[in-house]
Image: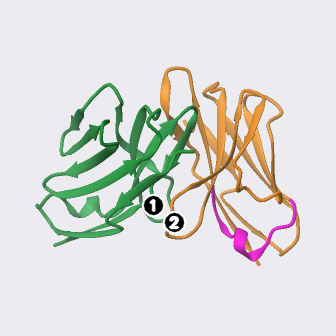
């Protein structure tokens, strides 16, 4: 029973064409995160929501936006994808007494 | 903000030998230190973690040590097996964020 679900698993998009990745959770965790992981690199935090409070990392490009309409769902919007945005995008949650993360399976995005 | 440094970037050990990966962190307020194993194309999997009020934790062949004064922590894998081959990331949690080290690619030689 998957607890953090990311859709789609694989996404191919054209250069400059907006794309949205989704994440849902059944854990009722109050914090949700988006990470970008490029090949052979560490996951890099893009932003996170603490409840409804949005927290952007200083070096996250303006091209990346996020929405959290309710506790269960969080979306990553890439307004004008570039070739350099090809990566695995990982959603994670944390909450309650859980210090660590629960990761989703990731969405592998390819920009062509 | 928090900065986590990890080394070595690659590590090759003979099957049955031990492997050690070391990390340092910068934020003295960090209070939680997880280690993740990531296989190719898969999500990071938590393998062990330690909180700042503990100096050492062990789970079968895996152990983690933490030196808060020096701000460094280490992962020890004993009796390595082929299935231990993967990329390992250390991480540190400060406030509500987990920041990852750069990763260590561990290869186990038969």
- Residue A38's x, y, as percent? 59, 67
| Residue occupied by mark 1 | B102
Residue shown at 69% from the left, 48% from the top: A57
> What is the quadrant of the C terminus of chain B in the image?
bottom left
Chain holding disc 2: A
Contact check, label 1 and label 2, Cβ < 8 Å: yes
Chain green in the figure, letter: B
Please identify the quadrant where the N terminus of chain B is shown: top right
Q: Secondary structure at mark 2?
A: loop
On the same chain, marks 1 and 2? The answer is no
Q: CA distance from mark 1 to mark 2?
A: 6 Å
* Chain identifier of the residue bearing label 1 in the image: B
Label disc, if present, on residue B94 of the rendered structure: none
Q: In the rendered image, which residue does mark 2 sit on? A: A41
**In this rendering, would A73 be left or right of A91?**
right
Report if residue B88 is visible in the image.
no
Q: Is residue A80 magenta?
A: yes
**What color does chain A have in the rendering?**
orange
- The quadrant holding residue B58 is top left
Q: Residue drawn at (64%, 30%), measured in percent from left and top?
A: A26
- Magenta stretch in the rendered image: A79-89
Q: Position of residue B9 (x, y in %)?
A: 36, 68
Image location (x, y in percent) of residue B48? 33, 40
Whether residue A88 is visible, yes or no, is: yes
In percent of width and height, residue B75 lies at 27, 49
Quick check: A39 above or below A30? below
């Amino acid at each position: 029973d998957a607890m953090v679900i990311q859709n789609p698993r694989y996404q191919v998009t054209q250069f400059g064409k907006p794309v949205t990745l989704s994440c849902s959770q059944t854990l009722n965790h109050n914090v949700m995160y988006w990470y970008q992981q490029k090949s052979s690199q560490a996951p890099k935090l893009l932003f996170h929501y603490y409840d409804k409070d949005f927290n952007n990392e200083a070096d996250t490009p303006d091209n990346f936006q996020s929405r959290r309409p309710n506790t269960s769902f969080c979306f990553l919007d890439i307004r004008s994808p570039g070739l350099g945005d090809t990566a695995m995008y990982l959603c994670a949650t944390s909450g309650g007494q859980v210090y660590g993360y629960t990761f989703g399976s990731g969405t592998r995005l390819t920009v062509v | 903000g928090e900065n986590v440094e990890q080394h070595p970037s690659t590590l090759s050990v003979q099957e049955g030998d031990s492997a050690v990966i070391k990390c340092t962190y910068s934020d003295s307020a960090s209070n939680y230190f997880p280690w993740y194993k990531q296989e190719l194309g898969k999500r990071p999997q938590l393998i062990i973690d330690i909180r700042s009020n503990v100096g050492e934790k062990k789970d079968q062949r895996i152990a983690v040590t933490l030196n808060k004064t020096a701000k460094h922590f280490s992962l020890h894998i004993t009796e390595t097996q082929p299935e231990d081959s993967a990329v390992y990331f250390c991480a540190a949690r400060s406030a509500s964020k987990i920041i990852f080290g750069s990763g260590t690619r561990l290869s186990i030689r038969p």
